[in-house]
Image: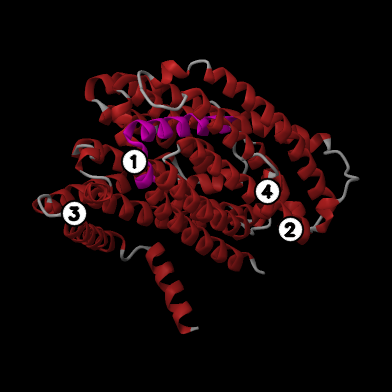
Amino acid sequence: MKRTQKSIINVIASVGTNAIILITAFIVQKALVSTMGGDYNGINGLFSSIISMMSLADLGIGTAIIYHMYQPVAERDTAKINTLLHFYKKCYIVISGVVLLIGIGVGLFLPMLVGDVEIPDSIYLIYVLFLADCLCSYFLAYKKSLLYADMMNYIPDTIYFVTYLVQNALQVYVLVAFHNFILFLIVKTMGKVVSNLLISLYISKKYPFTREKAVAPVSEEVKTDIVTKVKGLLCHKLGKMLVTGSDSIVITGVLGLGVMNLYTNYHLIIGGITALLNRIFETLTNSVGNFLLDSNREGNREVYRKIDFINFWCFGCVAVGMYAVLQPMVTLWLGEDFLFDKTVLFVLVVNFYMEGMRASVNTFKEAAGIFHEDRRIPLVEAVVNLTVSIVLAKLMGAAGVFLGTILSSLVVYLYSYPKYVCKPLFGMGYGQYVGQTLRHLLVLLGILGMTELCIRPMAGWSPVPNLLASGTMAVILFHAVFFLLYGRSEEMKYYWMLVKNKVRK
């Protein structure tokens, strides 16, 4: 199968499965809130954030391994592939131990993190089950790197999709029939184990050479390069963990579990949509990784501009749409008691956009293996985010937490990306990249302002008509401005020609 065909299949599979996964997550969340109440919902959101932060223990080894697999997979060098897989397996054994130790350490501070909350179940037992779920995610997970390097992401995506649907159905049944949060978490963990086991069996059948026991040790050259990249990735992981995961801890610590209960619901929607869109660009990373093997700066810049154009189109349109529909959606889904005010919503949407617009640059950055050069940047971003978010949370409430995240991202947009990615890979000057990024942001802010004026008269409507009318208005308004400003651009001409050629065929 050709590279382009694999990319298209991967994107379609990712978007389709993640869209349905997001819908089923809404159903599970509704069942959780209805049967167990807001305190359990807040704890579920807080512990999910804490456990996701422990993915730091992966150290980025998986990304570095996949980077080194592109060449042997392209050349079908089974011996080298096996060497990398077995090295990855040993790393994951160590990683599991590190996660367990970190988890025990964090567990000692649970009362401080959770605060005063009265629920029938032990918070320690709940936390142990969350930790077990995290550890089980490493079970046979190292094998998936081969499918990612071989641009067959749709295989693990499909297996995960099916097992996730079954898992969610069982979780809803457990909540409705037994009102049992502990059993709810056990079902979640078993779903992860079954998913990884099925993927492992598929890989063993498709790639029989992976069952070989006699495997040569990884060369010192490759090991040294992986260690170098992991050192850089560790900083990236740590920085990302502090930026994304700390929001929940700051909210709970400064503003209380009640605000966390509200944020958990918005985070599910925004996080789910972000994951859905990011999977498209993550899928493209493997294609770009293969493309970079035989390309130059001019070719890189041309492909980057096309990807960045789609990046803005997708995240810009979705950001405007979310601003218009999130309030009626949450009202319809959970009720008016679970709403943030419009200021918080605005900041959340802009934060979603700023995070999403990293995708086009990160696609090239990760495919090119640029991890060591900018290793200190995520730590600087994390320190700025944590400091500013705590200060602004006390001054502005929840909006201040997310505004702190937005301000900290300027470290990446104004310094890291121009210096470490755009100049060496694309030959773009500082002014070119920053100017383009600023233009996109100003266009988005302008459209958001116009959207607010258009949807404000609909605020008193019932949720369903409000959601439909506001969403339609937002999408039409975004595209009217978008086509007016970018309709004659080279990127638009390229995609228009691509569509016409497909139609003719």
Among numbered discs 4 and 3, the one appearing first in the sequence? 4
Residue 145: image tag: 4
Q: Nearer the viewer, mark 4 or mark 1?
A: 1
Identified at 76% across, 32% down, the residue is 224
Q: Which residue is mark 1?
A: 33
CA gap between label 4 and label 1 equals 36 Å
Give the residue type that dot 4 points to.
Ser
Q: Amino acid at mark 1?
A: Val
What percent of the width, then of the height, locates residue 80? 82, 48
Is 480 above or below relative to 228? below
Cα distance between the residues tagged 4 and 2: 14 Å
Task: Classify 10 Å Cα crowding around label 4: few (below 14), some (14-19), many (20 and above).
Answer: many
Q: Is residue 36 magenta?
A: yes
How far is the residue under mark 3 from the one under mark 1?
19 Å
Q: Going by the image, does 50 lie left or right of 88? A: left
What is the residue that sits farthest to the right in this orientation?
214
What span is in magenta? 29-56
Which residue is under mark 3? Answer: 463
Element on which disc 4 rests: helix
Q: Secondary structure at mark 3?
A: helix
